[in-house]
């Protein structure tokens, strides 16, 4: 790991975390509504994956703010979307769970668990026959790996040797259901290992995530078929703002907080001399400014007009649409 | 009584009375249900009867059908109506058809419960009731509970019915405190006359009941005395109660949260036309959700569904247009 890369990781993870903390505050202030799924604690996964998978298509689930920002989406546009504003990345129509930007090859926030996996496979098929080899990255949770769509996807992707990275973010819980209550094992790679290379990594370590995805990317680019990575990680917050997270113990939470991906990266970097205190101070100040700006932008942006209700249903307004 | 407590009480008493009643679904057990409907049941009845499932809706319903075939009375909970689409094949191709395809030999005492409807800014993938889809399938009974009494009696009836029942709930109703009326000789298929009136019949169901009640107060001020009918059962439809009312008032309005095209209102309108064409003094008015996926922004979200204000406005416009 070189200094530049470590600094980039720190910057994006801290940016993601501060974004989420601001989103949480604004939710409490009543400026954001609906479901808000925070990524706090899991930043190493979001940032490590998006930094390594810098080309190709990305399909994600609903816990995707940090993924979107790490992919290059402007935090202002993401925050404005959370506020439901016209300036938001999905023009206020999608909200927190539905951030899309085709210009960044970023598809989803999909709020149907595992619903995006067959779509990712289809995209990989199309890219392959179009002669492109950047491949497709699909991220999902441990809960999604129990769904039929997941099993169908790993089967088809491996039967057709499609360039897909299946990235499973195992935070052990699907809302309030522990993975061990509904799956015969905690580590989900057992389900996949006969289909494709499948490995388990420490999802609290951004460098490890980055290296794993880099390796996987090389593999799929060489036309060898799909690749599976399972990262063990943890969300500090409840599933969404309406979940107090009472189903897990304080001790469990403390164990993972002691592995905090941002604090640990900082410590490592200082120890190895890859960045100094001054860098962190300045970066934190810069991020604070960016986040404040994003919130101000979202606050000051206009709401969509009621006339926009029917915009975006079809490419061209159909005659049989009742106005 | 809270709406969700009425549902909980119905499940609890049914499980108590009959050990073949089980409930299964995502987060229904240890977590207590995402809308707290199954709260307390796990500790009372244990994991064999209160079953936490993986996120696998097709299997939740498919497994429940298998349990029903084997003699249990399963209640399958789908966390949000949108996810019932993943189970649609099991509900439609299997649950609804087994009895008929077996020449009446098979019995599927299954209840599939699901909350749906437009809540608050949950966006398009979390904001629907597929009442029209279910109601168009022969072999399914579709009940829609808008109040604590019907939630309690209707759900109990569904659990002990030997036929597959889709039991629709609305997310905004769970925390509502409602009057609980005891009902003697409960008939699940009977529509409720929520308010008697003489000028117009307003037909509605689920959460729209409350918007219509509010709208009716305003209409009263404008000199329109509305009769309000809450359907309770969407399949079968209590066309008799509807027709009797329309024959009296000579005018009908249907209010539904569902999208207008091909919605429940379309079917109700067709049946009113069949039964009451010559009694009508005006074309039937349909006030429905817009034909758009539900937007996240609150202003647009409200623009996409009926509200009390819109109901009043549309009825007054319709009155003026038709000189009634
Ligand atoms: C098909 C479907 N069923 C149920 C839900 C409700 N739901 C939303 S998130 C979630 C848990 C998903 O857990 P996991 O896949 O582990 O992802 P995490 O939230 O932990 O990131 C559930 C059950 C849904 N959105 N879609």
Image (cartoon, coloured by chain):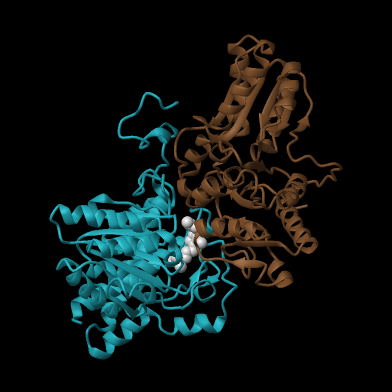
Chain colours: A cyan, B brown
| Vertical comparison of A293 with A235: above or below | above
* Residue lying at 77% horizontally and 19% vertically, measured from the top left: B198
Q: Quadrant of residue B211?
A: top right
Q: Is residue A289 left or right of residue B127?
A: left
Q: Is residue A60 left or right of residue A125?
A: right
Q: Residue furthest left?
A: A131
Q: How far across and how far down the image is residue A88, in percent? A: 36, 48
Tell me if residue B177 can be seen.
Answer: no
| Vertical comparison of B49 with B157: above or below | below
User: Which one is nearer the viewer's eye here, A237 or A316?
Assistant: A316
| Vertical comparison of A318 with B39: above or below | above
Please state, as top left, top right, bottom left or bottom right, where the C terminus of chain B lies in the image: top right
User: Which one is nearer the viewer's eye here, B55 or A262?
Assistant: B55
Q: How far across and how far down the image is residue A154, in percent? A: 33, 64
* Residue lying at 33% horizontally and 69% vertically, measured from the top left: A167
User: Which one is nearer the viewer's eye here, B38 or A31?
Assistant: B38
Q: Residue furthest bottom?
A: A271
| Vertical comparison of B138 with A203: above or below | above
Tell me if residue B316 can be seen.
Answer: yes
* Residue lying at 23% horizontally and 70% vertically, measured from the top left: A52
Q: How far across and how far down the image is residue A318, in percent? A: 35, 27
Q: Quadrant of residue B230?
A: top right
């Amino acid at each position: 790991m070189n200094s530049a890369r470590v600094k980039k990781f720190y910057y994006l993870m801290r940016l993601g975390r501060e974004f989420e903390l601001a989103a949480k505050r604004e939710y409490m202030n009543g400026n954001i509504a609906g479901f808000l799924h925070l990524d706090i604690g899991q930043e190493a996964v979001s940032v490590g994956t998006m930094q390594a998978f810098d080309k190709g298509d990305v399909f994600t689930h609903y816990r995707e703010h940090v993924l979107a920002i790490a992919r290059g989406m402007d935090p202002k546009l993401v925050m404005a979307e959370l506020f439901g504003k016209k300036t938001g990345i999905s023009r206020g129509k999608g909200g927190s769970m539905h951030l899309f930007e085709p210009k960044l090859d970023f598809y989803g926030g999909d709020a149907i668990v595992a619903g995006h996996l067959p779509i990712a496979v289809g995209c990989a098929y199309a890219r392959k026959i179009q002669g492109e080899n950047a491949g497709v990255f699909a991220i999902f949770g441990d809960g999604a790996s129990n769904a039929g769509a997941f099993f169908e996807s790993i089967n088809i992707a491996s039967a057709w040797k499609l360039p897909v990275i299946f990235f499973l973010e195992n935070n052990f819980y699907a809302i309030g259901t522990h993975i061990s209550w509904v799956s015969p094992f905690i580590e989900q790679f057992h389900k996949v290992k006969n289909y494709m290379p499948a490995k388990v990594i420490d999802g609290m370590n951004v460098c490890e995530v980055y290296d794993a995805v880099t390796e996987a990317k090389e593999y799929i680019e060489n036309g060898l078929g799909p690749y599976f990575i399972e990262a063990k990680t943890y969300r500090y917050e409840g599933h969404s703002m309406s979940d107090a997270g009472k189903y897990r113990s304080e001790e469990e939470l403390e164990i993972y907080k002691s592995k905090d991906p941002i604090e640990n990266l900082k410590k490592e970097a200082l120890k190895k001399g890859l960045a100094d205190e001054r860098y962190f101070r300045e970066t934190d100040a810069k991020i604070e400014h960016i986040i404040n700006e994003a919130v101000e932008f979202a606050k000051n942006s206009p709401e969509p007009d009621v006339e926009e209700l029917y915009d975006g249903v079809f490419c061209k307004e159909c005659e049989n649409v009742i106005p | 009584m809270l709406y969700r407590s009425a549902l909980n009480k119905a499940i609890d008493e049914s499980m108590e009375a009959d050990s073949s009643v089980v409930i299964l679904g995502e987060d229904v057990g240890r977590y207590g249900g995402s809308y707290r409907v199954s709260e307390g049941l796990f500790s009372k009845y244990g994991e064999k009867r209160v079953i936490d499932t993986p996120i696998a809706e097709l299997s939740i319903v498919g497994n429940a059908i298998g349990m029903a075939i084997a003699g249990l009375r399963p209640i399958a909970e789908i966390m949000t109506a949108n996810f019932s689409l993943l189970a649609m094949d099991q509900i439609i191709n299997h649950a609804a058809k087994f009895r008929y395809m077996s020449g009446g030999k098979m019995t599927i005492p299954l209840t599939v419960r699901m909350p749906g409807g437009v809540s608050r800014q949950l966006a398009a993938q979390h904001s629907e009731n597929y009442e029209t889809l279910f109601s168009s399938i022969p072999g399914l009974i579709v009940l829609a509970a808008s109040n604590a009494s019907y939630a309690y009696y209707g759900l109990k009836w569904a659990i002990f019915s030997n036929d597959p029942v889709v039991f629709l709930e609305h997310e905004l109703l769970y925390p509502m405190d409602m009057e609980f009326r005891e009902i003697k000789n409960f008939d699940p298929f009977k529509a409720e006359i929520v308010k008697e009136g003489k000028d117009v019949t307003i037909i509605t169901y689920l959460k729209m009941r409350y918007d219509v009640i509010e709208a009716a107060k305003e209409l009263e001020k404008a000199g329109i005395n509305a009769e309000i009918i809450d359907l309770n059962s969407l399949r079968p439809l209590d066309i008799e109660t509807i027709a009797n009312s329309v024959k009296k008032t000579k005018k009908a309005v249907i209010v539904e949260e569902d999208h207008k095209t091909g919605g429940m209102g379309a079917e109700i309108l067709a049946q009113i036309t069949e039964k009451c064409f010559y009694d009508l003094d005006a074309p039937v008015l349909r006030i429905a959700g817009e034909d758009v996926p539900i937007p996240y922004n609150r202003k647009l979200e409200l623009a996409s569904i009926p509200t009390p204000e819109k109901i009043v406005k549309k009825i007054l416009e319709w009155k003026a247009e038709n000189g009634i």
